[in-house]
Image (cartoon, grey):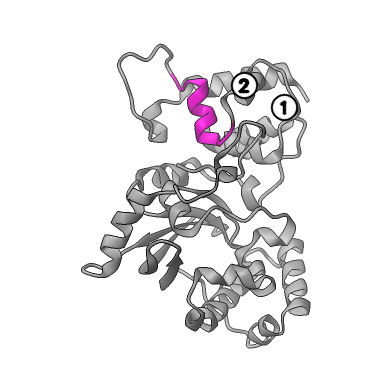
Amino acid sequence: MDLPELGAFLQSRRARITPAEVGLPTSSRRRVPGLRRDEVAQLAGASVDYYIELERARGAQPSPQILAALARALRLDSDERDHLFRLAGREPAAESGTAAHVQPALLALLDELHATPAQIITDLHETVVQNRLAVALLGPPVPAEGHATSFVYRWFTDPASRTVYPAADHPHHAKVMVSDLRAAVARRDHDARSRDMVARLRRASAEFAELWDTGDVAVRRGDRKRINHPTLGVLDVNCQNLFSEDGRQRLQFFTAPPGSPAVEQLRLLAVIGTQDLTDEHLDTTNSDHRHVRML
C-alpha cells in the first residue's frame, strides 16, 4: 500500500472532473478547477473526513467497496481503476457486486436520469449503484456477501426478498430470472462464480432446480412489473434494460405507462424520496464506506 501515491492520485483525478460531468450544480464562484473533496465524498457515499484523510495519506487501508465507489465517482477507466486498487494494496480483479467497475459512459447516462428510478446491476443481478429514486422505489441493497449479493440467489433462498413483488407475480419472476441467469452463465463461459451459484441454488431450492432443468433461456431486456411500496402501494411500471457492450452490466430504469396511475405515483415518489429509510442507511460518520452511491 502506498498511501502518499494514493492521495496524490486521488487529487489529480479529482482536479480533472467538472461538477457538470457528474451531475452536480456549477457555480462561477468555485475556487477549484475540478471537484471539491466534499463532493467526491458525497458521490462515493463516504464521510468527508474519511476522504480528506485518504488524500492526506492517512488512515486505514480503504476497503474494495470504497475504492470501487471512488472509481465511479471520479469516472476512472479500467486502467485507472486497477491502478487505484494497487496503490491501496488491493487486488483489482473484482467483477461482482458493489466492487464491480462501471464504465464512465454508463454512469454518465445514469446521472441524466434525475426523474426516473434507475440502477446499474450486473448480469447476476447484483446492485452496483442506484440513483435516489431507485432507492426510494426498491430500497437500498441488502448488506450481504458472496452469492447473497445477487437478487436472483436471494429470491430462491430468502423468502423475504420476494415481498418487493405481489405474490401472484412470483411464478412469472422466478421463471424469467432463471432464464436470464442461464443466458448470463453462458455469456460468462460457465466461469467458476456462476457455476457455483447454480450448483448452490439447485441444492437449496427445488423450485429453482425444476425451472433450471427446463433449459429455458432468455435475456431479460424488458418487462412489466408490479412493485410493492410501503407508502404508495403497488406501482405498475415498465422496466427496461440497457446493456454494456460485454453484457455483464445493465442500466435498469422504471417508467410509468402513459395515462396510468403510476404516473402520479412516481411523481409522489420523487417527493417522498428516501425519508422513510432509517438513519442507519444514511449515516456514514463512523464508517469508511457506504456500499452503494445514491445520486
Q: Which residue is mark 1?
A: 87
Residue 33 at x, y percent in the picture: 42, 16
Of labels 1 and 2, earlier in sequence is: 2
Looking at numbered disc 2 in the image, what kind of residue is underneath it? Answer: Phe
**Any part of residue 250 in sight:** yes
Q: For residue 188, what is the image quadrant?
A: bottom right
Q: Is residue 97 left or right of residue 114?
A: right
Q: Is 246 part of what is drawn in magenta?
A: no
Q: Is residue 45 left or right of residue 134?
A: right
> Relative to 4, does residue 178 appear above or below in the rendering?
below
Residue drawn 41% across the image and 72% down it: 226
Residue drawn 48% across the image and 20% down it: 36
Position of the C terminus by quadrant: top left
Q: Which residue is mark 2?
A: 9
Magenta residues (range): 34-46
Number of labels in the image equals 2
Q: Is 42 part of what is drawn in magenta?
A: yes
Residue drawn 51% across the image and 50% down it: 277
Marks 1 & 2, CB-CB < 8 Å contact: yes
